Image (cartoon, rainbow, N blue to C red):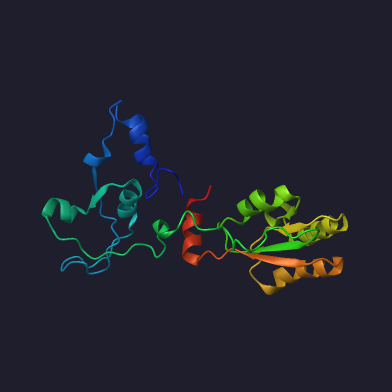
Amino acid sequence: MGMYRKPVTGMWDYLCEKGDDGFPVQKEDCLYVGDAAGRSANWAPDRKKKDFSCSDRLFALNIGLKFSTPEEFFLGWKTAPFHLPNFDPRTLDPNAPLHDPAASLISPPTEVAVTVGFPAVGKSKFVKDYLVPKGYVCVNRDTLGTWQKCVASCEEALRNGKSVVVDNTNPDLESRSRYINCAKNAGVPVRCFELTTTVEQAKHKNRFRG
């Protein structure tokens, strides 16, 4: 999704930084009027179609602007019922622990760690920030191209006495069993790192990841 496409705040950021001829924008004095407000079908007696999206309402929400539909602002109508996406990032606790504090991320001396999780939920960042610095060899299908090359890379690292982390979605038993077998053949333990992100949150993150 482009940075200037609603509900991303790029247009507003540009206005504040460059687009108002040097005059500072006073957000508290601004409001946003839009018809993509997430209203369901038949939201008013003569309005049978539902809104095509809720991007205008979300755009205002992301910026922190007061929001009205055209009917509310110009005609004085009451607020109609509306629906927002199931996932609301505002409900997340930014201070929640990344993992069980009683559990150890690292299991010496040698192991295979298999990540499991939807696309865009932070598997690669987790691996890069927490496991690779500890000496784990990262095996990733996006980089290597095929699962066969991933297995070969895993086997090579284990022969060299290195721990391995498999940074793929690994959603099914067949995918995971390849690396479980690698660990068994090398005589090392294997663990699963499951990222418990919901489908709704994964879809949200996938829209905005770079």
Q: Along the line of sight, which residue is nearer the eye, 171 or 4?
A: 171
Q: Along the line of sight, which residue is nearer the eye, 60 or 193?
A: 193
Name, please, the residue furthest toward the right: 159
The residue under the point 11% across, 54% down is: 75
Left or right: 26 with respect to 55?
left
**Whole-percent x and y of residue 81?**
24, 66
Q: In which quadrant of the rendered view does residue 168 lie?
A: bottom right
Name, please, the residue furthest toward the left: 76
**Whole-percent x and y of residue 177?**
74, 71
Left or right: 135 with respect to 35?
right
Left or right: 141 with respect to 84?
right
Name, please, the residue furthest toward the front: 102
Total tally of numbered discs in the picture:
0
Q: Along the line of sight, which residue is nearer the eye, 187 or 88?
A: 187
Q: In which quadrant of the rendered view does residue 84 lie?
A: bottom left
**Whole-percent x and y of residue 148?**
78, 62
Name, please, the residue furthest toward the top: 22
The residue under the point 13% across, 51% down is: 74
**Whole-percent x and y of residue 201?**
48, 61
Q: In which quadrant of the rendered view does residue 150 lie?
A: bottom right
Left or right: 197 with respect to 139?
left
